Amino acid sequence: MFQWSKKVVKSVTFEPGVADESLLELIESHLEKEPEKTFSDLCKEALWQFLCVPESVRPSPKTAATPSVEQQIGELRSQLADLEERFFAQEPNRLEMMERHLMQLSQQVAQLAIMAHQTPTIQSPMPSKPAPGVIHATPTPVQEVDPVISRISQFLDDF
């Protein structure tokens, strides 16, 4: 059986002409976009695709792609750091907003409590027989503080 040496070099010839020159320009522009690849890598990929070899059988890419993976990891880390900075920058604002809302709620609860204690109960003498054609409203008893407000006041007391 034929034994290959460790490194085999084959040449590709580009003839002067529109087709070969445009192909050469495309290759150069592609290699500029992916500087970690070489012309050899590009030729091998094209041959693998042209020969319809399944990707599971193809050899894994060289470790030359490792810097791009490390570069992507670095970019992700910097994006994560930026996200954390923005989150923590907004967090004190959120806390201040919650404190303001709690203060407003506590003031409203206090006002409601004052109003509940200051509302006089009007007791008017009730006639034994209502006069015809006159509608009398019966005074409504003073209600206790709303249960939702009492629950909120518990939180405010703890706060």
Image (tube, helix red, strand yellow):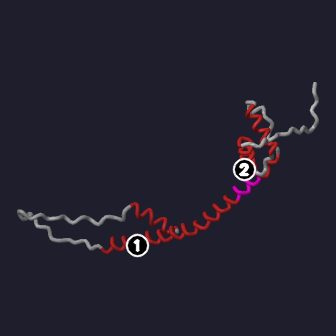
Question: Among all residues in the image, which is located at the extreme front?
Answer: 16
Callout 2 secondary element = helix
Rounded to the nearest angstrom, the CA distance separating label 1 from label 2 is: 73 Å
Going by the numbered disc 2, the residue's amino acid type is Ser
Please state which of residues 107 and 121 is positioned toward the viewer in this rendering. Answer: 107
- Tell me residue 42's x, y (percent): 77, 42
- On screen, residue 31 above or below 145: above
Residue 130 in the figure: left or right of residue 122:
left
Quarter of the figure with the N terminus: top right
> Who's the residue at 20% across and 71% down the image?
123
Discs 1/2, front? 2
Q: Are marks 1 and 2 in contact (CB under 8 Å)?
A: no
- Tell me residue 75's x, y (percent): 71, 57
Callout 1 secondary element = helix
What segment carries the magenta color? 68-77
> Who's the residue at 74% across and 45% down the image?
21
Please state which of residues 27 and 57 is positioned toward the viewer in this rendering. Answer: 27
Please state which of residues 59 and 52 is positioned toward the viewer in this rendering. Answer: 52
Q: Is residue 66 magenta?
A: no
Q: Which mark, by number, is residue 95?
A: none
**Residue tagged by mark 1?**
110
- On screen, residue 149 above or below 107: above
- On screen, residue 123 above or below 1: below
Q: Considering only order in the chain, which callout, 2 or 1, is on the residue closer to the N terminus? A: 2
Q: Which mark, by number, is residue 29?
A: 2
Please state which of residues 7 and 82 is positioned toward the viewer in this rendering. Answer: 7
Q: How many marks?
A: 2
Going by the numbered disc 1, the residue's amino acid type is Ala
